[in-house]
Amino acid sequence: MTRLLVTGGAGFIGANFVHHTLTTRPEFEICVLDALTYAGNRDNLKSVAGDIRFVEGDICDTELVDRLVADADLVVHLAAESHVDNSLRDPEPFVRSNVMGTYVLLEAVRRYDRRFHHISTDEVFGDLPLDSEEKFTEASPYNPSSPYSATKASSDMLVRAWVRSFGVAATLSNCANNYGPYQHAEKFIPRQVTNVLTDRLPKLYGSGRNVREWTHVEDHNEAVHLILEKGGIGETYLIGSGCEMSNKAIVKILLELMGKPVDRYEEILDRPGHDLRYANDSSKLRTRLGWQPRHRSLRSGLAATIDWYRENPWWWASRKDAVESAYDASGR
Ligand code: NAD
Ligand code: TDX
């Protein structure tokens, strides 16, 4: 058995990573470390509670991290403050968890000589022009726009430095926007789906022309396993499905799939510093590690995601009002 420590395993991507790992790779014995912030939810792991060890705790807790890393063979690090809008309201937890937390983990994996995989985002590269074919590559310069992406960029830099200076056996991946089950209702797609399900209007920042590359969370997590299995130490891999779409086009598809008029949405106050477009060139991952996204139709991925939220109101409904009140307070 390989002992795997997953930080942030009670969050959206982390919980899906735990489910995916248990299904596809039974050789792993999983321990999840998660602080259960507002974004972490034990319910995300309810169906596998008996198959994993769960530790509620903070990645900034040096002693706890030291003990858990000592007991692991490898660490997949997902724990982070993850929402751009929250980072604009209060950046402090982002600096703490994303920068300090990554530092604490790196020191522990250095001490015990453990394999480390760092999960990051394409937002570290800033944004691309709207009407272009340009894509980010592993060699793109770092140019983060928001406090969130600045702290993720900082954490990537720490990982790269620990590889080079201390010989830590780490890999990094920068994925495009994820979607799928268990995504918090603060994020774009679940927010709009749950808005429609609660008779609210979908809300587009500005005119909705900003473009994101949507990758299904299962495809992201399979890429992470391929990197663990075959990735080069010190290497960075960009992950992206190739499914680019404007926010307005997504809202229209969601409305259509949910049987509503496609113009039944509202345009609201834009996000300050709003990144225009993200798109990843994932050819390194595809050609060297053989990754292919399984979810290639965004439309059917969105339909399945709508079904999941429709069938699982127990998971999101009691928290929906609080999410919208927080947005109301910031005018969005
Ligand atoms: P999420 O907000 O849903 O989950 C984050 C998890 O980390 C939560 O369970 C939370 O409790 C935990 N956490 C936060 N601070 C912690 C701390 N100090 N100690 C221990 N646990 C802590 O986020 P997500 O969308 O699942 O993102 C996971 C990772 O993937 C993040 O590193 C994020 O930057 C990265 N990422 C996300 C996306 C995306 O589209 N969601 C895309 C690319 C990369
Ligand atoms: O209500 C909304 N209306 C809207 O138009 C919300 C919540 C968002 N948006 C827009 C902003 C973005 O252009 O939709 C797009 C997606 O927004 P988010 O879901 O907040 O994602 P984004 O800011 O692109 O960042 C996401 O992808 C990269 C994740 O939250 C990050 O954790 C990840 O690193």
Image (tube, rainbow, N blue to C red):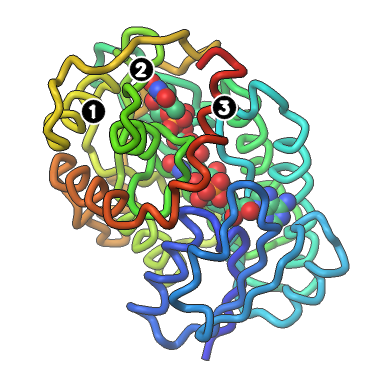
Q: Residue at x 66, y 40 (%)?
A: 157
Measured in 3D between alpha carbons, the distance from the residue under mark 2 to the one under mark 3, in whole angstroms, is 17 Å
Query: Which of these two is toward me, 163 or 56?
Result: 56
**In the foreground, 190 or 123:** 190
Numbered tag placed on residue 325 in the rendering: 3
Depth check, mark 1 against mark 3: the one in front is: 3
Q: Is residue 74 visible?
A: yes
Picture layout, residue 148 above or below residue 138 = above
* Distance from mark 2 CB to nearest ligand 2 atom below 8 Å: yes
Q: Is mark 1 on a helix, strand or loop?
A: helix
The answer to whether marks 2 and 3 mark residues whose Cβ atoms lie closer than 8 Å is no
* Dot 3 amino acid type: Ser
Dot 1 beta carbon under 8 Å from ligand 2: yes
The residue under the point 70% across, 72% down is: 55
Q: Where is residue 43 in the image (x, y as percent from the top left)?
A: 51, 64
Residue 273 in the figure: left or right of residue 216: right
Three-letter amino acid code at disc 1?
Ile
Q: Name the residue under label 2.
A: 204
Q: Work out how far the residue at label 1 is from the one at label 3, CA to CA, in angstroms.
A: 24 Å
- Label 2 residue SS: strand
* Looking at the image, residue 301 lies above or below residue 141: below
Q: Determine which of the numbered discs, if any, sits on residue 126 in the image.
A: none
| N-terminal-most mark, 2 or 1 | 2
